[in-house]
């Protein structure tokens, strides 16, 4: 079986507090609170912002808000962005998403890249304003132009969601260049699955390695999946398992699902179906659909327990609807082989194949050949080989935010 490679478009969230910027801010950071407050009173917006950061880090949110508000009034965009964050979360000020959007927009208009990303997220979510996908995309694009790496990543996520994978490759590459490890991992996913261009597993490995070295747990897990199979790199399954274990121990549920697969297959470990099931169940309970697919497989096949076909079908459908292609393919197999219903299985195989499942392409090719459509069968078989040959488990997309705050 082929291991689950994360295809997550690591995404979204924002941040506020921290400093960053030029020499003046670094100089201000060396001043005591009283000196900063005097400069703030004299109309130095940057001093107000730095003093606000100190107050926020001391959990004095009300005082931080007062300094940020004065900083924003004095045309310091970081103060506007930071005040927006406090209003978004109701820290020290009333929770007010409309006010947060206004502040993020003000800071974005003043060319603060982080604020543009924050604005994009609010517009995408319809928080404080009606949802505006086009406005969100424009805000992410502006953030990326202003060289805020997470803005590039979020722009790539948006483009991928719309099927514009070639454009997403460019955005993720820029985010990676600017130092966002998650963007590197996302670019690796597109290269590994041939989305937006040809499959290039060697380049995928390079970007996953960059992500891993940048302390992206998902990047390390993705790199592990390539190492386990020897895709684009010399196989090293034991190192792969080490990455999975580290990820699982760090609370990344995809790592638990992959580690479960290693126990199930006996990859550098003694085969242990019970431990595999426990890990799959942990991942599934936390919302990792690859874990749900693993639980369903055990229930379907009666691995280490009594079969439960009804529950297996429910979990496959849940995982499929959440964007896990291999679960779509497996549900199709159940329909075809256990219920003799190839007609209902076919669209599930097609969806799975379209989204990068080798199993889905292989099963759809069989149906095409049975129907006498040799040309289509050949195309589908070629796609299956391109995706990784005859294998049961394969790369399955997922979508997981990286973190809820991105420091300057």
Image: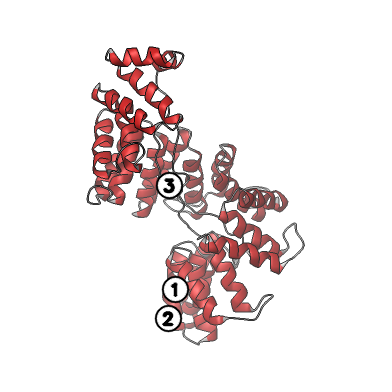
Residue sitting at 66 percent across and 54 percent down? 228
The residues tagged by marks 2 and 3 sit, at their Cα atoms, a distance apart of 34 Å
Q: Judge depth for marks 1 and 3 and give the one in front.
A: 3
On residue 182, which mark appears? none
Q: Judge depth for marks 2 and 3 and give the one in front.
A: 3
Residue for badge 3: 11
Residue 265 appears anywhere in the view: yes
Q: How far across and down, in percent of the image, does residue 242 sit?
A: 69, 49
Looking at marks 2 and 3 on the same chain, the residue that comes earlier in the sequence is marked by 3
Are circles 2 and 3 on residues that touch, CB within 8 Å?
no
The residues tagged by marks 1 and 3 sit, at their Cα atoms, a distance apart of 27 Å
Q: How far across and down, in percent of the image, does residue 225 sit?
A: 61, 53
Looking at marks 1 and 3 on the same chain, the residue that comes earlier in the sequence is marked by 3
Residue sitting at 75 percent across and 59 percent down? 269
Residue sitting at 39 percent across and 14 percent down? 34
Q: How far across and down, in percent of the image, does residue 316 sit?
A: 50, 72
Label 3 SS: loop
Are circles 1 and 3 on residues that touch, CB within 8 Å?
no
Tell me the quadrant of the picture where the N terminus can be found. Answer: bottom right
Residue 376 appears anywhere in the view: no
Label 1 SS: helix
Note whether 140 is above or below 67 in the view shown.
below
Question: Which of 115/358 is in front?
Answer: 115
Q: Is residue 300 left or right of residue 273?
A: left
The residues tagged by marks 1 and 2 sit, at their Cα atoms, a distance apart of 7 Å
Q: How far across and down, in percent of the image, does residue 219 sit?
A: 56, 45
Question: Which of 248/189 is in front?
Answer: 248
Q: How is the image coloured?
A: secondary structure
Question: Which of 47/212 is in front?
Answer: 47
Tell me the quadrant of the picture where the C terminus can be found. Answer: top left
Residue for badge 2: 344
């Amino acid at each position: 079986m082929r291991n689950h490679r994360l295809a997550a478009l690591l995404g979204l969230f924002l941040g506020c507090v921290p400093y960053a910027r030029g020499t003046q801010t670094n100089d201000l950071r060396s001043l005591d609170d009283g000196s900063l407050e005097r400069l703030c009173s004299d109309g130095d917006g940057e001093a107000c912002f730095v003093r606000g950061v100190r107050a926020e880090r001391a959990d004095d949110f009300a005082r931080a808000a007062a300094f940020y508000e004065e900083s924003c009034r004095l045309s310091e965009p970081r103060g506007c962005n930071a005040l927006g964050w406090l209003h978004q979360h109701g820290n020290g000020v009333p929770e007010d998403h409309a006010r947060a959007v206004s502040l993020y927009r003000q800071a974005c208009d003043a060319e603060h890249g982080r604020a543009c990303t924050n604005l994009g997220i609010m517009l995408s979510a319809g928080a404080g304003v009606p949802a505006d996908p086009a406005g969100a995309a424009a805000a992410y694009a502006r953030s990326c132009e202003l060289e805020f790496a997470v803005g590039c990543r979020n722009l790539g996520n948006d483009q991928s969601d719309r099927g514009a994978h070639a454009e997403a490759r460019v955005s993720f590459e820029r985010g990676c260049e600017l130092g966002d490890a998650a963007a590197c991992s996302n670019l690796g996913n597109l290269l590994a699955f041939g989305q937006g261009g040809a499959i290039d597993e060697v380049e995928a490995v390079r970007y996953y390695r960059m992500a891993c070295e940048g302390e992206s747990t998902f990047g390390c897990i993705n790199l592990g999946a390539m190492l386990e199979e020897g895709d684009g790199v010399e196989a090293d399954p034991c190192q792969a398992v080490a990455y999975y274990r580290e990820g699982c121990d760090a609370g990344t549920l995809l790592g638990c699902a992959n580690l479960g697969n290693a126990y199930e297959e006996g990859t550098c470990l003694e085969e242990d179906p019970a431990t595999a099931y426990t890990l799959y169940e942990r991942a599934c309970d936390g919302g990792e659909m690859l874990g749900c697919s693993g639980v369903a497989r055990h229930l379907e096949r009666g691995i280490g327990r009594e079969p439960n076909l009804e529950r297996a079908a429910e979990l496959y459908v849940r995982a499929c609807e959440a964007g896990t292609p291999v679960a779509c393919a497996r549900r199709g197999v159940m329909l075809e082989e256990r219920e003799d219903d190839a007609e209902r299985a076919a669209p599930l195989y097609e969806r799975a194949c379209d989204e990068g499942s080798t199993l889905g392409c292989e099963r759809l090719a069989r149906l095409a050949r049975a129907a006498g459509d040799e040309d289509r069968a050949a195309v589908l078989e070629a796609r299956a080989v391109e995706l990784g040959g005859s294998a049961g488990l394969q790369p399955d997309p997922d979508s997981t935010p990286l973190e809820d705050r991105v420091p300057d």
